[in-house]
Image (cartoon, helix red, strand yellow):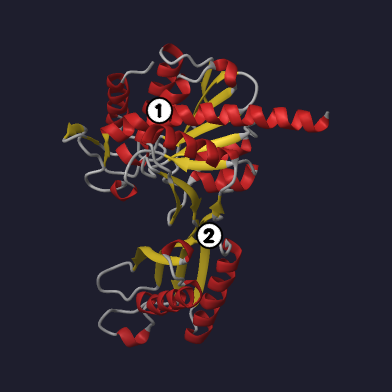
Amino acid sequence: MISPSYAIELLRKALEQYTPSRSEASLANMIKDKCTNDLGFEQVNIDNVGNVIATKGHGEPRILLCGHMDTVPGQIPVRIENGFIYGRGASDAKGPLVAMLLAASEFPKQRGTIIFAGVVDEEGNATGIKQIVKSKLSADYAIFGEPSGIDNITIAYKGRLAIRLTCDVGDSAHASAPWLAKNSIEEMYDFWNTIKSEINRIGIRDNKANSITCSLTEITGGSSHNVTPQKCKITMDIRIPTITTCEEIIDLLDGAIYKVASRKRVKATYRIEDRTEPFEANHSSPLVRALSLSILDVRKKHPTLLRKTGTGDMNILGNALKIPVITFGPGDPHASHSADERVKIEEFVSSIEVFNRALFHMSRLHQGKKVNVTKDKI
């Protein structure tokens, strides 16, 4: 039985590893060492992109527990204060990651196969989960560790498009004679306004979960303080609900960009830097039932099902493998990426038991389903 003090200490050590995207090796090695020497996993390895994969048990159900080891940049001193543990990744998502790892370590080997995956680059280009999908990992169910709050289950995430748009006006001029050339930064303003207007025209709904959003996140332009800029580049982050698709939004963007470029007689090109389709889990799957029962067991209340406005690794694996998936974990999503990122210690410790009970219920429900199938055949 994992003690609360062991769990808290392991989380503290995980938080002390600074692991921005693609710099997760120290945490991967720490987890590999714990899985091999302390936690009873039978096979442990680090794959060619840096994911740590640990398995134990045999037979069905084969349950994947997947969390990410990377964080957004920015270090936060690790400390325990007023019932919280602070540190970069405490909420997103080392708290859920460590809770899943410890729950997996307690799962009886005879009740099925547990596959724990600590993946890389979730905050970047999803290199880790894409490698998991590419490896054709065999699983019947998957639970992703992200901060939902201990009384909630995340059933849906928006998709994401990251678009890098370049405006090239073909020439530049001395800043004292701006009439001699168009200004790419000023021209880009019209592209952005048109795109945002088109998104708002089709995308605003009665709730945020079903609305399309578009954020301008990066802008670069110009070569000198006294030269009008020939080129300007912007990055747009577009979040796409399950009522539409990435392809539909790309068609909309393509038309808007072409319209503005033709009207203003400038060159505009764009590159898709990330494309992740939206995803919503099957609400009636045995996995949703198992996790709901586990929250009821531990928290004595029925969970709330959430549709989130962000995008997660669940989108990629859920759309690719077509197996029941769900996302759950301790932590306040609004604390994620913040300057005082934290997780409530009581919630973190309780979440280990929630994961533990979810694995028990999932094994029980899966075995019951197999018995029913056998009876039907007889």
Specify the quadrant that holds the N terminus.
top left
Question: Where's residue 280, x and y in %?
Answer: 55, 52
Q: Nearer the viewer, residue 26 or 308?
A: 308
Find numbered disc 1 in the image and state the secondary structure of the residue it sits on: helix
Find numbered disc 2 in the image and state the secondary structure of the residue it sits on: strand
The residue under label 2 is 272
Residue 118 visible to the viewer: yes
Question: Where's residue 144, x and y in %?
Answer: 48, 39
At x 36% / y 38%, what residue is drawn?
330
Q: Quadrant of residue 177?
A: bottom left
Q: Nearer the viewer, residue 42 or 221?
A: 42
User: Disc 1 residue type?
Assistant: Glu
The residue under label 1 is 353
Q: Nearer the viewer, residue 298 or 287?
A: 298
Name the mark nearer the viewer: 2 or 1.
1
- Compared with 150, 239 (above or below) is below
